[in-house]
């Protein structure tokens, strides 16, 4: 059995349709200044395809970057809270779309913390010796569930996917330690009550698109929860704040990110931030930010990268990744989404009308 599970491949999938703050202000009483001042978001993406399509493209690009055969993938985990279908799992859809016929597959829903949860599970399964090549994907199509009459949630979210490949390694590499948690007493702070078997679907006021979102409570718990998890991880590994080379946090709110960096006494130059381009893409934020940091040359060989997230549940998670020696893909994939001939507002037009 290998002692470590190295990240050997990575890929992302960003849908082409861009929805800017100015465009949102044409359908909701808001403005570019209001959104940016409260969240740091300037624009987000709207997918024209199901969540599994985003996940499949990201996975194929990660597999190419690792230069492994699709037939060699024996584990496929999709972190998502916006599945194509509940039965079967989104991971099953992805398996069929990429041809990973030899893989065990399942979805993992820990909200925005889902990628770290999934990375932790896949790492343990690789280290057990039972699996050799795992693909871990964070993929979301959150815009499908938004009520476009509710400003507090409509302006925050977007769609995309990111993926990594894990393989056994004897060199200290990959996720060295993680710590996961949940504050179930506050689960109503972020809740989609109309989606699940506890719902009275025959009620006169049934609404699939109802969101319960307490931004103030989430902010308060997010900073405290992520800070606590990161401290546990660093203490377990015998590291200090100075040992951190980069932080890749969940991209939910720029002020939350800045507060976490301040708590860890880490300069913002070491923090990967892309919330301004994509908004909150839930479980996809960390893998996409990781890929973009690699593309920009910000990840150095043997870097110590701290991951931190919080999400619906309210889940919380942190992990320390030791990067390997390679920071560029071995191969490039030609996988692409089907063309999109509509603007973001055109893609959302029926949803906007339905939820007004």
Image: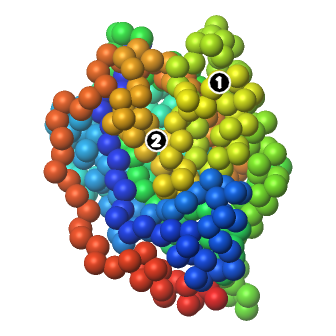
Q: Assess whether mark 2 and mark 1 are in contact (beta carbons under 8 angstroms).
A: no
Question: Left or right: where does residue 204 sit relative to residue 92?
Answer: right
- As measured in the structure, the alpha-carbon distance from the residue carrying label 1 to the one carrying label 2 is 18 Å
Disc 2 target residue: 289
User: What residue is drawn where x is 66% and y is 64%?
Assistant: 33
Q: Quadrant of the N terminus?
A: top left
Residue depth check, mark 1 versus mark 2: number of the one nearer the observer: 1
In the image, residue 151 sits, relative to residue 11, either above or below, namely below
Q: Residues within 10 Å of mark 2 (few under 14, many from 20)?
A: many
Above or below for 343 versus 167 = below
The colour mode here is rainbow
User: 15 or 49, which is in the foreground?
Assistant: 15
- Residue 223 place in picture, x, y as percent: 75, 39
Element under label 1?
loop
Residue 76 horizontal side relative to residue 356, left or right = left
**Relative side of 78 to 53, left or right:** right
Does any portion of residue 126 appear in the rendered image? no
Residue 340 in view in this figure: yes
Give the residue furthest to the front. 33
The circle drawn on residue 152 is: none
Residue drawn at 41 percent across, 79 percent down: 347
Quarter occupied by residue 231: top right
Residue 214 found in image quarter: bottom right
Q: Position of residue 168 (x, y in %)?
A: 33, 20
The residue at 64%/8% (across/down) is: 238
Q: Which residue is mark 1?
A: 266
**Residue 127 vs residue 306, the one in the foreground:** 306
In the rendered image, the vertical position of residue 204 relative to residue 297, given as above or below: below
């Amino acid at each position: 059995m290998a002692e470590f599970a190295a990240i050997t491949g990575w890929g992302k999938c960003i849908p082409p349709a861009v929805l800017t703050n100015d465009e949102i202000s044409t359908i909701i009483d808001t403005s570019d200044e209001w959104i940016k001042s409260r969240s740091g978001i300037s624009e987000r993406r709207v997918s024209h395809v199901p969540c599994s399509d985003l996940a499949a493209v990201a996975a194929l690009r990660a597999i190419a970057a690792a230069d492994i055969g699709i037939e060699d993938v024996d584990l496929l985990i999709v972190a998502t809270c916006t599945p194509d279908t509940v039965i079967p799992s989104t991971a099953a859809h992805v398996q069929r779309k990429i041809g990973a016929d030899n893989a065990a597959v399942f979805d993992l829903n820990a909200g925005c913390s889902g990628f770290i949860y999934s990375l932790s599970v896949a790492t343990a399964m690789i280290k057990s010796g039972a699996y050799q090549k795992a693909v871990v994907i964070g993929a979301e199509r959150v815009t499908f569930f938004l009520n476009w009459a509710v400003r507090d949630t409509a302006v925050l979210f977007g769609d995309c996917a990111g993926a990594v490949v894990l393989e056994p390694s004897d060199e200290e590499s990959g996720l060295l330690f993680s710590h996961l948690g949940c504050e179930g007493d506050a689960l109503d702070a972020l809740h989609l009550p109309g989606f699940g078997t506890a719902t009275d679907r025959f009620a006169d006021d049934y609404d699939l698109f109802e969101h319960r979102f307490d931004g103030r409570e989430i902010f308060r718990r997010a900073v405290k929860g992520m800070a606590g998890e990161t401290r546990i991880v660093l203490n377990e590994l015998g590291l200090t704040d100075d040992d951190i080379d980069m932080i890749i946090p969940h991209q939910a709110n720029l002020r939350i990110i800045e507060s976490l960096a301040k708590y860890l006494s880490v300069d913002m130059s070491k923090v990967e931030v892309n919330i301004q381009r994509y908004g909150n893409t839930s479980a996809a934020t960390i893998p996409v930010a990781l890929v973009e940091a690699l593309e920009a040359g910000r990840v150095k060989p043997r870097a110590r990268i701290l991951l931190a997230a919080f999400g619906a549940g309210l889940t919380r998670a942190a992990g320390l990744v030791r990067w390997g020696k390679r920071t560029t893909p071995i191969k490039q994939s030609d996988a692409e989404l089907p063309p999109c001939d509509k603007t973001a507002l055109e893609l959302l037009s029926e949803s906007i009308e339905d939820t007004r």
